Structure formats: structure tokens, C-alpha cells
Image: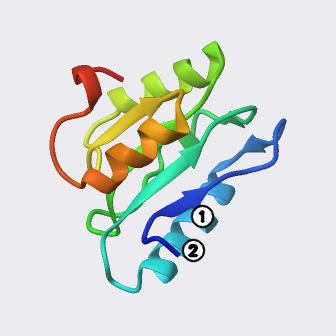
């Protein structure tokens, strides 16, 4: 493991509140008290309104890169980026390489100062 958490679901799946709570529990368990960067793959999944309001607890994740490729993915990311308070820096990417570079950097602003 390279110290980066990765979260993904099957394409076409609708993610509900229970799904997100299970993911958050897994994140907490994997982190073992450490604050780790996380990559969330948004491509091809749908989130219920309620599930988009659930985030990892403060301190369990150091920064979150949202990776998508479609206009729907971007809209989901915009919603996530506008919800407050967020537990850590969050940014949207369409390039996995750029997302991983940003996650590994560990500090600093989001790329180009935008989602």
C-alpha cells in the first residue's frame, strides 16, 4: 500500500447513506488513527442526496481527490465541494495521475484554485 486510501463502487450503482457509513467505518479501520489521503472514484455511480452529506470524521482523512470523467461526475463533485464544513481539502480531477500527485503532495492549495 502506498499510504493512499482508494474508494470505489461498481459502475451504475446508487450509493445510499448506509453505503457511505460502511465506507467511513472502513476508512477509520484502515487508517488506524492516522490521517491518510484518499482517492474517491466517482465515475459511473450515483449518490442519493442524503449520502452526499456524509463525510469521514475530521482527522481520519488528510485530503480527498474526487476522480471522475463525465458531466454528472463533475456535478456530484461540485455538490461535495460546496458542502461545509468539509473535514479536509477536497478537489476534483479528471486525470488519475494529477489526482495522485495532488494527494501525495500533502499540503497546499487545490489545483488552479478550483474544483
Vertical side of 95 occupied by 25: above or below: below
31 relative to 23 in the view: left or right: left
Q: Position of residue 52 (x, y in %)?
A: 53, 39
Q: Position of residue 84 (x, y in %)?
A: 28, 37
| Residue 80 appears in the rendering | no
* Numbered disc total: 2
Q: Nearer the viewer, residue 80 or 110?
A: 110
Q: Position of residue 2 (x, y in %)?
A: 47, 71
Q: Residue at x 55, y 48 (%)?
A: 40
Picture disc at residue 57: none
Q: Secondary structure at mark 1?
A: helix
Q: Are marks 2 and 1 in contact (CB under 8 Å)?
A: yes
93 relative to 105 in the view: left or right: right
From the image, tell me which residue sits under label 2: 26
Where residue 78 sits, quadrant-wise, is top left
Q: Residue furthest left?
A: 108
Picture disc at residue 23: 1
Q: Nearer the viewer, residue 3 or 60?
A: 3
| Residue 42 appears in the rendering | yes
Give the class, few, some or many, for how many residues have Cα within 10 Å of label 1's Cα (few <14, many ≥20): some
Q: CA distance from mark 2 to mark 1?
A: 5 Å
Q: Residue at x 52, y 65 (%)?
A: 24
Quadrant occupied by the C terminus: top left
Where residue 36 sits, quadrant-wise, is bottom left
Amino acid at each position: 500500500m502506498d499510504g493512499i486510501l482508494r474508494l470505489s463502487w461498481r459502475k451504475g450503482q446508487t450509493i445510499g447513506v448506509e453505503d457511505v457509513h460502511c465506507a467511513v467505518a472502513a476508512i477509520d479501520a484502515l487508517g488506524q488513527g492516522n490521517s491518510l489521503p484518499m482517492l474517491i472514484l466517482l465515475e459511473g455511480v450515483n449518490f442519493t442526496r442524503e449520502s452526499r452529506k456524509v463525510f469521514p470524521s475530521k482527522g481520519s482523512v488528510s485530503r480527498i481527490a474526487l476522480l471522475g470523467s463525465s458531466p454528472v461526475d463533475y456535478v456530484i463533485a461540485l455538490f461535495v465541494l460546496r458542502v461545509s464544513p468539509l473535514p479536509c481539502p477536497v478537489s476534483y480531477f479528471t486525470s488519475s495521475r494529477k489526482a495522485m500527485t495532488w494527494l501525495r503532495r500533502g499540503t497546499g492549495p487545490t489545483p488552479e484554485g478550483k474544483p
